[in-house]
Image (cartoon, rainbow, N blue to C red):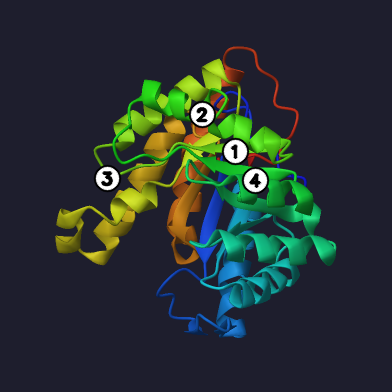
Amino acid sequence: MAGVRVGGQPGENPTVLIGTIFYEGHKIVSDPVKGLFDRGKAEELVSCQDELSDETGNPCMLDVVGRTAEALKKYVEFASEATDSPILVDSPLAEARLEACKHAVEVGLGERIVYNSINPEASREEIEKIRDIGLKAAIVLAFSEYEFEPEDKMRILQGNDGLIAKAEKAGIEKVLVDLSVLDVASIAYTAASIQMVKEKLGLPSGCSPANAFDTWRKAGEFKPQVKRACLAALNVFVRCFGADFILYGPVEAADTVFPSCAAADAILTYSLVTGGYEVKDKNTPLYKIL
């Protein structure tokens, strides 16, 4: 989507790394309702992610979060000017997501927009509005507080009322499956779910380990550099289990996540090379960082 390849066998295509900006509590935001923010600092953060993407060969996307439609529209417009990467339109409110996406399509950004996300609570009205707007790419979030094993995730995704069916009804042609996490320990289930979805449904799959990191109470006792190492480890873990994309958390963590995931990608690609695989695109971590 928008020139970024997502999916394939581990090592075939580099992990797509997605940083989040304008999230709740982000210090660069002065008014989350009106969407006022420090443009200079925001540009620095986005530029850093883009530069690391170029250096490592790991493609990137930008997850843009807004509390209101007014704010989210401003944030998306900024992101479209600050980077050429695909933009995830994200909000806790479906109304804000829909209005911001509609505006983005109207100003010619439709090909770069990824709706984040279609979840089990998505209403018929939301699905119809996504279709009417004409969006073609979306994340489907297979989240449940009570169903977290791989077989549970498959039930959430499949069937007449499953997330895949909802995405089809919404006119979505490019689906990214977010298998979600509850806490650090649940990442074991998420990793197995990623593998199952790729094997049985053939869809690009990933998750956001950073969400689990926020629930890790003991991590509060770690020194800052140890926290960053642990965050890198969580991201590398899910990549080694086949994650095609990773929502790695605040975009400020790019300098930690990109090198660590690039190292894992380089090793995974080399494992394919030793089996006879020919790397056609040299813009990949194997050739960028080793």
In this image, 48 relative to 74: left or right?
left
Q: Mark 3 or mark 1, which is nearer the start of the sequence?
A: 1
Residue furthest to the top? 275
Identify the residue at image location x=38%, y=20%: 151
Q: Earlier in the sequence, mark 4 or mark 2?
A: 4
Image quarter of residue 165 = top right
- Classify mark 1: helix, strand or loop: strand
Q: Secondary structure at mark 3?
A: loop
Q: CA distance from mark 4 to mark 2?
A: 15 Å
Residue 61, given in percent of the width and then of the height, sits at 62, 54
Marked residue nearer the N-terminal end (1 or 4) = 4
**Inter-mark Cα distance, 1 to 3:** 21 Å
Q: Nearer the viewer, mark 1 or mark 4?
A: 4
Distance CA(mark 3)–CA(mark 2): 21 Å
Depth check: 5 or 71 in front?
A: 71
The amino acid type found where label 4 is placed reads: Ile
Q: Tell me the residue that label 3 is attached to.
A: 183
Label at residue 157 = 2
Kind of residue sitting beneath label 2: Leu
Task: For the residues labelled 3 and 2, say whether their Cβ atoms are less than 8 Å apart.
Answer: no
Residue drawn 32% across the image and 32% down it = 147
Q: Which residue is mark 4?
A: 127
Task: State the residue in front, 35 or 12.
Answer: 35
Reply above or below: 270 against 46: above
Instruction: Say what amino acid the circle numbered 3 marks.
Output: Asp
Among numbered discs 4 and 3, the one appearing first in the sequence: 4
Q: Return the disc, 3 or 2, that comes first in the chain's sequence.
A: 2
